[in-house]
Image: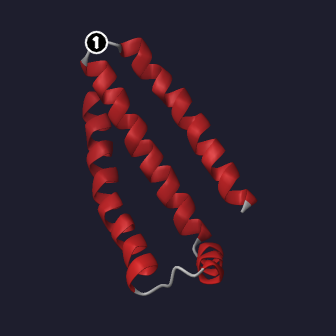
Amino acid sequence: MKGLSWLMQLLTGLTLIFLVGYHFIVTHVTGSLEMNEVIIRFHELRLFYAVLLIIVTYHAFNGLRIIAVEYGLKKLGNAFYVLLLIAIGYGLFLLSTV
């Protein structure tokens, strides 16, 4: 299972390079930071931001879980999956309320 965890960490990290790059270009290069345009852009890219939230959260919690397991805290490592689901659920809830 360690191999799958490291593979997912690698794949989500590579995916984040492109997603964060796209976010940077859309927000800071081609877009404006005026409030009305930010709100319009957010509603147009809501699915993109939901995917970005899920991948960033998975990458972060999986990285913390890998560290915990490597330090011998396997039981604590399993708790990260529960925290991951709670964090993703809360983040998606917040995205849906905007």
Question: Residue 55: image x %, image y %?
Answer: 44, 52
Residue that numbered label 1 is attached to: 72
Q: Would you call the spot at circle 1 few (<14 residues within 10 Å), some (14-19), or many (20 or more)?
A: few
The kind of residue on which mark 1 rests is: Gly
Q: Residue at x 57, y 82 (%)?
A: 34
- Horizontal side of 38 relative to 73 (left or right) equals right
Q: Residue furthest right?
A: 97
Please state which of residues 1 and 63 is positioned toward the viewer in this rendering: 63
Q: Residue furthest bottom?
A: 30
Question: Residue 27: image x %, image y %?
Answer: 45, 77
Q: Residue at x 53, y 67 (%)?
A: 48
- Horizontal side of 17 relative to 90 (left or right) equals left
Please state which of residues 5 and 35 is positioned toward the viewer in this rendering: 35
Question: Residue 74: image x %, image y %?
Answer: 36, 14
Q: Quadrant of the C terminus?
A: bottom right
Check the image and report above or below for 80 versus 18.
above
Question: Residue 69: image x %, image y %?
Answer: 31, 20
Q: Secondary structure at mark 1?
A: loop
Q: Residue at x 36, y 31 (%)?
A: 64
Q: Residue at x 58, y 67 (%)?
A: 47
Q: Quadrant of the N terminus?
A: top left
Q: In this orientation, does residue 1 appear?
A: no
